[in-house]
Image (cartoon, rainbow, N blue to C red):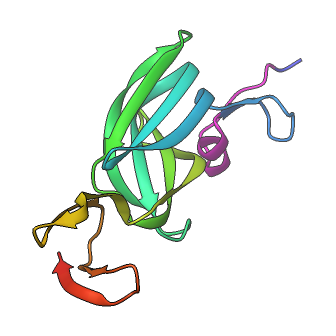
Amino acid sequence: NMAPTCSPCSITWNVGSCVPAGSGFCTLPIQLVGFDAVVKGSGVHLHWITETEENVDYYTIERSRNGNDFVAVGTVPGNGTTTLRHEYELVDEHPFIGQGYYRLVETDLFGHSVAHRIVEVKIDGAQSVELHPVPVTKGVLNLRLSFHSIQSSLAIISDIMGVAHCEAVFS
């Protein structure tokens, strides 16, 4: 009776360590408990939890506009091999406006990478608008905009009848 062995092959590195192919006994390099992305302030906070890790060198967070073409945002060191729960976080300070996708990629100590879950976020361009005083007194209206945009934006000040009194381009 021969003991099963693992040998490095392209499938093995994509799914983790395994005993003979087709046996159904494969383990991933990490046991991922959760991965999420939350818009906070002007950034996207990415948070993930692992239950176990096997030979993990580092994690890479990647982002994409279309869910297919990803670019690296940043990396976080892994914990090698551990059976302890670990929490990780990375903040994308320059997220895409509109719909975007983030992916977690784990790279092991041998340089092999495995892509994990993809999460979706949506960031509206305008985050807040402050006007004061309302109603306008002495012909002065103060306007403060806080927004995420890589393009210029147009603000139009109009009265209750819809008549535009002022236009300004912000970039």
- The residue at 46%/67% (across/down) is 98
Q: Is residue 52 above or below residue 74?
A: above
Quadrant for residue 133, please give it.
Answer: bottom left
Quarter location, residue 134: bottom left
Most foreground residue, 75 or 126: 126
Residue shown at 59% from the left, 40% from the top: 8
The reply, left or right, for residue 61 in relation to residue 33 is: left
Query: Considering only vertical position in the picture, is 143 above or below 4?
Result: below
Q: Does the magenta segment cover residue 7?
A: yes
Give the camera-side residue of 108 and 136. 136
Residue 99 placement (x, y as % from top left): 51, 65
In x, y percent, where is residue 29?
Answer: 58, 30
User: Where is 106 relative to 65, above or below?
Assistant: above
155 left or right of 80 in image: left
Residue 168 against residue 39 in the figure, above or below: below
Region rendered in magenta = 3-16
Q: Position of residue 142 (x, y in %)?
A: 15, 63
Left or right of residue 132, residue 162 in this image = right
Tell me what residue is drawn at x 56 percent, y 10 percent: 83
